[in-house]
Every structure is written in C-alpha cells, then in structure tokens.
Amino acid sequence: MTHDPSSGPSTVAVVLAAGKGTRMRSDLPKVLHEAAGKPLLDWVLETASEAGCDRRLAVIGHRGDDVVQAFSDQDVEWVVQEQQLGTGHALAQAESVVGREDLLVVLSGDVPLVKAATLKRLVEAARSGWGAMVVADLDPPGSLGRVLVDDEGNLAGIVEAADANPEELAVTMINAGIYALPAGEIFDALRQLSTENSQGEFYLTDAVTAQAAAGRRVALVHLEAPQEALGVNTRLELASVDEVLMDRCRRRWMERGVTMVSPASIRIDPGVMIGEDCYLHPNVTLSGSTTLDTGVTVHQGGWLRNTRVGASSEILPYSVLDGAEVASNCKVGPFARLRPGAVLGEGAKVGNFVEVKNSRLGAGAKASHLTYLGDAVVGDGANIGAGVVTCNYDGTAKHRTEIGPGAFVGSDTMLVAPVRVGAEATTGAGSVITKDVPDRALAVGRARQRNIADWSGRVRPAVPSNEGSNGSSEEK
Ligand code: UD1
Ligand code: MG
C-alpha cells in the first residue's frame, strides 16, 4: 500500500522491529521467532489492524529481507534502518513516508501481548491532549524504563534502567514502549536528540520527555494487566509470552463451546477453527488451517495439521493427521497416521497402525489394523483386512490401486499396483495380487499349503518329555 497524502491525516502504526535481539542467541531475527503459532511481529501487526490503524509500517534492519519475505502476503509498509542506533533513530526512519498531520501509534515488534482495546484507549487519550504513552505498575520493574511524574501526576521523565540512579530504579511505574504521538512534532523532537546516555543510543523516550517538558500533555494510559507490557528479549521470555497467548486462545475456544481436559497441555494455532461441542483431551495439538466440525472428539496426544474433520468424528489417542480430510462420524486411531491427500468418507474407519497417503476411502470403508494405503481409491463399505499393503512404488514411479465398493481384502494381502480389485470381490489372506480381480470374484495368490507328516523328530528334535525327571524342569 502506498500513502496518498491527499487522503488527510491517518493513524499510522509504526512497529520498531529492527533490533538484532542479541540475547536470543539466534540466527533468526527476533521478531520472526514464533509464539503461539505465528511470528512475534505478526501479533503486533494484527493488533494494530484490530485497533483500526489506517496504515501499518514496520522498521526493519537485521536480516530485513527475511522479515519482508515472511510477511509477503500481508499489507505492511517496510522502512529500513540500516544501523540500529536506538529507538529514537528507528522511528525517525519513518519520517519520509508519513504525513506531518498523522498520528503515529508506536509499537515494539518484541512486545506482542498488547491488546487492541489498549491501543484504542491510547489513541483516544492522545487526541484529547498532545500525545499519550502506555505505562504499567510492575514490581519488580526489571530492565524496563522508569516513568517519573511530577506532583500533579504529569510525565516528568523516562529513565532507562541502565541510566537510573538508585532512587529512580526503585520506581515501579514502567514504560511499555507504546505511544501515540503527533508525527510532525515528534519528528522535530527526534532531530534534537543526542546519544549522551550509557548505551550511546538515540532514545525515543528522551524526545517524548522533551515534549512534556515543553508543556505538551502526554497522557499516561495505565495497563490494568501489566502482563500486556511483557517483552521478549530472551528465549525464557519468549516461552512466557507464548504461554499467555496460548492461554488467551484456549479461553476464546472454551467460551465458544469447546471442552478441554487439562487445557494447559493443549496447543491451538491461530488459523484453526473448532465447532461447538468439540472435546479436546490432554496433549492435543491443532495447527495450520485445521478445522473441526461440531462434536468432534480428539483424544490424548492427537496431532492435527491442515486437516478437516467432519461432525461427530472421533480421533482416538496418539493419531497424526496431516493434510487429511475426514468426513463426519468417522473413527481414526488409536495410533493412526493420515498423510496429505488422505480422504475418509462418511463413517469410515481407520484403526491402529494404519497409514494412509493420497488415498480416498469411501463411506463406511474400514481399514482397522496395521495397513498401508498409498495412492489408492477404496470404494464404499469395503473392508481392508489386517496387514494389507498397497505396493504403490516400484522404485521409480508411484502406481494406483483401486478397490471396488463392498470388496473384502483378506489379511496380509499385498496389492502390487497398478491393480484393481473389483466391486464385492474378495482376496484370500496372504495373497500377492498382481492382476486385476473381476467384480465379485475370489482371488487367491499364494502357494498352496502342503503338510508333511511326522516332521517333528526328523529335522527338529522331538519335544522333550518330563518323564523320569519328577516333573522338575531342567535349566537350559
Ligand atoms: C525500550 C524503552 C524502554 C521501555 C522498553 C519497553 C527506549 C530508549 N527505551 O527499551 O523505556 O521500557 O522499550 O519494552 O526507547 N529497535 C529498533 N532499532 C533500534 C533499537 C531498537 O528498531 O535501533 C526496536 C527493537 O527491535 C525493539 C524496540 O525497538 O523491538 C525496542 O528496543 P529495545 O532495544 O528492545 O529497547 P528496550 O531496551 O527494551
Ligand atoms: Mg526490548
């Protein structure tokens, strides 16, 4: 999106996200680290949209190309800060792309818990004065900037922990690093900044304080839940933030009618949809674009990615479903694996240790035990016995297997593809099927059984008898 200056003043979210995140000890830019299923920066940008910001800008630097790439499907304007000289310097990079009359909502790419409602309050507060900033009471205040106020409660200064004296360090009102500021005046103030502080950086906080000192009203918007101000500088903080976001997500689904057993052990990505009366057992993971229709139960340890499950289906414990489509009233698992392209029709059943890839099972079809179905079409109501394998790969190419409706594939049948088992046809247990089986026929493809009399005692010693040993067993 490009800015059209004729469209009047806008509310522009500017996310400062150029930092290297040295304390993460990572090759990945800090804002690309994921919490609760998406990058930190994504959470901040989403909140900016939810709060009604007209435009979204992000200031990037360290491995900026990777950041741009990660958001290629989103409407974000990028501003590059070549050298990371501080938060004031970072914001100054946006000057050429915003209007002087715009209101800037300044956010940090590493502070992802802030809520849209807070940003709305912030914008309102800024509009009724000169600008506004988010503060919170945090004890201990840690490494965050301390907010100093005068006798009337007006902003008197913001001191970084690294620059603070003991008295200032004891202050528990902290700067969340989130502001609403009139663009023209804050850019003018940023030009006056110096780097005379312990970190040798241009501090945005100094520009805000200078405006307050010049008599402009900077409203302090207090967070009721100081948690919103949590930032991510380390992997430990990343884990804490992830937990808060996951908790919010689970609560939302519970409010919408989903039951969770041991909710803290359940993970749900932002792109997931869950119908009413779904029942999630402990240690379930739902990721990507997974969709559960109403009344679906996912038992312990279920792992579902980009999978659709129809109403009232049941996913039994420890099943892995990836890119699968399961119709309603199906049963999958325990210990089943549905790989991409697995499609189960209404009421189909896939049991334990069954793997299905790029295969369609018709309504009511069953593969209950120890089976591999790859590149196959299984007709309605067909029964696949234990241990059946579609031998779909000849070392070079994949081939298809077709099993007609109502067919009965005997246990341990090897279906050497390409091959077709006709409608209502049967294969004998242990058969190797290399030729098509006509509808309703029985195919037996195995060596005929031969019994050799008195085998024991000739080649294999006879079973030792207990006679003469008083029934006591000898140690061997
Ligand atoms: C900043 C505030 C501090 C506040 C805290 C809240 C200043 C001087 N201090 O401190 O008062 O309590 O945030 O979390 O503003 N960034 C850039 N370019 C730079 C430097 C930083 O884009 O040159 C970005 C970082 O990627 C980060 C954000 O700005 O997303 C904040 O920078 P950071 O270095 O983390 O500042 P803090 O020390 O946390
Ligand atoms: Mg920080």
Image (cartoon, rainbow, N blue to C red):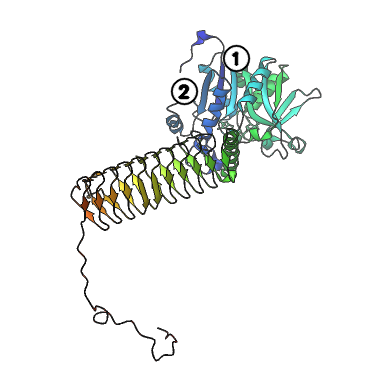
Q: Is residue 446 left or right of residue 347?
A: left
Q: Is residue 146 left or right of residue 404?
A: right
Q: Which residue is mark 1?
A: 184
Across and down, in percent, residue 325 comes to 39, 38
Across and down, in percent, residue 62 comes to 48, 34
Q: Camera-side residue: 464 or 67? A: 464
Q: What is the C-alpha distance between the residues marked 2 and 1?
A: 24 Å
Name the residue furthest left. 435
Q: Secondary structure at mark 2?
A: loop
Mark 1 or mark 2, which is nearer the start of the sequence?
2
Across and down, in percent, residue 450 comes to 20, 69
Q: Which mark is residue 465?
A: none
Q: Camera-side residue: 405 or 326? A: 405
Q: Amino acid at mark 1?
A: Gly
Residue 119: name its quadrant.
Answer: top right
Q: Which mark is residue 75?
A: 2
Q: Secondary structure at mark 1?
A: helix
Name the residue furthest bottom. 468
- Category of crowding for the residue at label 2, using alpha-carbon neighbours closer than 10 angstroms: few (below 14), some (14–19), many (at least 20): few
Q: From what the image shows, is residue 102 above or below residue 257?
A: above
Q: How many marks?
A: 2
Q: Is residue 185 left or right of residue 394?
A: right
Residue 21: name its quadrant.
Answer: top right
